Image: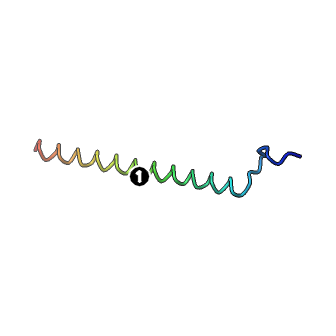
Amino acid sequence: MNDDRPTSDPTPARRDRLVRAVYTLAASATRGLATGAGSAAGTWIVWWITHH
């Protein structure tokens, strides 16, 4: 058997790397959404203040 070939059950180290990558992407996406929502809210508030 050749242990270098990927199997359906990845090695623990590979699985840890994958989990860490997924968490990092999720955190980045959440931060991006929060920043976008904050910017949209800020823009709306400024528009509302300047137009009333």
Image location (x, y in percent) of residue 16: 65, 57
Between 27 and 43, the one lying in front of the other is 27
Query: Which residue is painted at 71% across and 58% down in the image?
Result: 12
> In what element is the residue under mark 1?
helix
Residue bearing the label numbered 1: 31
Label 1 Cα crowd, 10 Å radius (few <14 / some 14-19 / many 20+)? few
Query: Which residue is painted at 89% across and 46% down in the image?
Result: 1
Image location (x, y in percent) of residue 38: 30, 50
Query: Which residue is painted at 63% across and 51% down in the image?
Result: 18
Image location (x, y in percent) of residue 36: 34, 46
Between 47 and 5, the one lying in front of the other is 5
The image quadrant where one finds the C terminus is top left
Query: Which residue is painted at 11% across and 41% down in the image?
Result: 51
* Colouring convention used in this rendered image of the protein: rainbow
Residue 1 in the figure: left or right of residue 49? right
Residue 9 in the figure: left or right of residue 34? right
Amino acid on which disc 1 is placed: Arg
Residue 20 in the figure: left or right of residue 10? left
Residue 28 in the figure: left or right of residue 6? left
Extreme-right residue of the structure:
1
